[in-house]
Each structure stands twice: as C-alpha cells, then as structure tokens.
Image: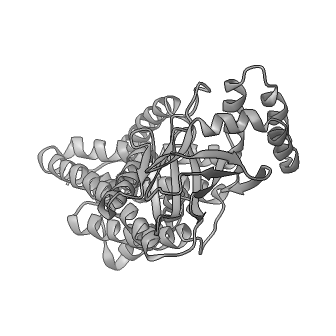
Amino acid sequence: MPCFPRRRAYAVVATAVAAAVIVLNALPALAHGFTSTVYADVTAPDTGHVRVELGLEYDLLVVSAADYERDDPLFQQGNGAFEAGDSAAQAAALDAHADSVVKYVTERFSVTGSEGACTPMRDGDFAIEQREGVAYARLVLDYRCPESATAHEVRSGLFPDSEGYVRDTKTIVTYDLDLKSGSAALDAQHPSFSTQQSLPERFWEFFRLGAEHLLTGLDHILFLLALVAGSRRPREIVLAATTFTLAHSVTFILAALGLVRVPASFVEPVIALSIAVVAGWPLWRLWRRGSHATDLATAGRFNLDRVGWTRLAVTFCFGLVHGLGFAGALGINAAWSWTLLWSLLVFNVGIEVVQLAIIAVVFPLLALLRHRAPVAARWTTGVIAAGVCAMGLVWFAQRVLGF
C-alpha cells in the first residue's frame, strides 16, 4: 500500500488548520450560536385562575425592555447591576421599572382560555436565579380567565427583538392545566400550544426540537464527523455511534430530570476538548508511526484487541458529557412524571435520527472515495480530522478563557 510520509502529514495539518481558521472567523465563538431559552411553569390553582412562573435571561430582558420603552433608564441601571454580578441589585433594578418590564413580557407572552383572553397581573417582586451559570429573572404572572374555559392556549413571542444579536428563542413550557400535565417546546415557527392538542402533536414538538438542536449544534456534528473520519469499516462506526448514543442518553435523561447537575462552565469546554481528542486520534497514530504509516485512514483503523476498546472507552466518556450538553437545551425544572419522561425520550429520538442520517450520508461517501480514489481519500480524511481537531482546540481555548 502507498505510504503517507510525515511531510504529507504536515501539509494535511497545515491545510486543515487554515480551513478551520477561515470557518471559525465566520462562526460565533460558541458553536450553538446566540440563542436564548425561556422557561415557563404554568399551573391552575383554581377555576378561572392560571399562574405562570417565567424564567428569562436577565441581561436580554433588560436590553429588550429598555429598548421597548426608550425613555426608561432601565438599561443603564440594569446593565450596571449585571456587570457587578449583584443579584439583589439586579432584582431591584427590575422592580424599580416593573411597569416597563411587565408590559414588554405580557405583550409577548399570553394565556388564552377557550372562552376568551386571560388578563395578567404581576404577583410579587422579581427574583434572580442562576441557570447553567447565567443570570435569570424570575417573574410570576397571575392570569384571570373566564371560569367557563375548558381549555387554554399558551403563546410565546419573547425574543429576539431589535437587540440584534439573538438568533432564536426556545420557550420550554411545563404545565399542569385542564387536568393535563406535560411539557411543550415553543419557538418562532411554532409559537403556541393548546391543552386540546393530542399526545402525538405534543411529542412531535420535542422530536423536532431534538432534531433541530443537533442540526444547529455544530460542535456535536463535528464530534460525529470525527468519529466517521476515524472509522474505516462499518462495524467500527456502528460500535462508536452506539457507544456515544448509550452514553449521552444516560446523562441526558438524568440531567433533564434534575438528578445530575454539572455547570456549563465545565460541560462546554469538555465538549470542545472531546472534538479535538477524537479527531486527533488517527492523526496521532500517523504521527507515531511516521513514514511507516500506510495512510491516515488505516492509521485510525479499528483494532478491537489493541486499540478498539480504548477508543470506545474515550467515546463513552465524552458521550456522557455531550448528554449534559443536550440536556442544557431543555433545562426542565419540573417534578418527575411519565409524561415528562416520554417527552425527554422523544427529544432524544430526534437527536438520534439526525445523528444516524449524518452518518448514513458521510460514511458511505468516504468509503466510496477510499475505494475509487485512495490518494484523494487519504487527503480528505486527513483534512477532515485535522480541521475538526483544530476547531475543537480553538473552541476549547475560547470556552476556558471565556471569549
């Protein structure tokens, strides 16, 4: 078989690093982009009464509400409290400008009964809490609805607004309403849900949310590409993908149910590091073998007796961390229930379907390239591995240093 000497390895790495730098300059520092999550806990204490407990990103809420009421000095006061990291000052800034904030929120978040609209009122003062290391404002709204209502609709249009740096917002709703309980995921394309919706309709929301989360999570996609680039035979990628799925499913369910809590300041850098390690595996083996290596693809060849178990163990460990990252997309803080568990499982199925689709497309293409054009395949595999590794290292540095 043709050899792949070190001078070609240098060229592959240099080409891939250059490509990675170009791509990174066009991407935000965090692979998921500038998105926000709103949390809404909706309950019905009694007939004609709906209580909504909202969790909204503090800094984003301040900017949006201040821009909404341009004559209100909330932005200067609220942002100063944010910079100081003073929770009491943050809550006080919101309380001092409660009319502007509540007006902004209630015009974008509404509850409607089957017999007519519900009227909101603020219940209590604002409070500040931490969610995955981010300051969130807690706002409780008391909605008065027609007592004859037999069903309710919740609609959210919160963020993005004219602040210009939020790409999308997911509103995660947990509810115990109209003798039904469960969860729903709202966004710009699907801004509302009704308690009259069927079970399949509610589960479809979580399947879609899981699929979209993987598709928009570039770091998770790159991890999959790293697994594909380091696999030469079908059984290798099947075992690696299965190991990754089992690992992230375990921590995803545990974290989403609130049984395991790990700060995002740890999870996000480790996810980036996992990309670099898995992508660098075949490159390291090539470097170690030097001029005796046959090619990058065979350098990462799966050997169950010597290397395979180590690779699977590494994939499993990093899969556990990726599961925590998936759970961060939901951040559900509700009592355990079978309905909630099924919603989480459906979200996970959405992730897996997209994951399998990516593998089903990329792996056969690389296999065909190896068969038809071995030299081009060596360069392609090397550039993918080196480029993904470089991007993972840059993300790791950015996330550790807080860029």
Residue under the point 41% across and 60% down: 285
Residue under the point 52% across and 38% down: 157
> Of residues 393 and 50, which is closer to you in this image?
50
**Image quadrant where one finds the N terminus:** bottom left
Q: In the displayed image of the protein, which residue is found farthest to the front?
A: 148
Residue under the point 43% across and 51% down: 114
Whether residue 226 appears in this view of the structure is yes
Q: In the displayed image of the protein, which residue is found farthest to the top?
A: 71
Task: Decide if residue 213 is on the left or right side of residue 87.
Answer: left
Picture coordinates of residue 83, whole percent (x, y):
82, 38
Q: Count of labels shown?
A: 0
Quadrant in the picture for residue 350? bottom left
Task: Decide if residue 286 is on the left or right side of residue 100.
Answer: left
Picture coordinates of residue 26, whole percent (x, y):
49, 29
Task: Decide if residue 103 is on the left or right side of residue 213.
Answer: right
Picture coordinates of residue 274, whole percent (x, y):
51, 58
> Of residues 235 and 179, which is closer to you in this image?
179
- Image position of 119 with respect to 80: above or below: below
**Image quadrant where one finds the C terminus:** top right
Whether residue 314 appears in this view of the structure is no
> Of residues 142 and 327, which is closer to you in this image?
142
Picture coordinates of residue 222, whole percent (x, y):
41, 49
- Image position of 259 with respect to 78: above or below: below
Q: In the displayed image of the protein, which residue is found farthest to the left?
A: 372
Quadrant in the picture for residue 200? bottom left
* Color scheme of the displayed model: one colour
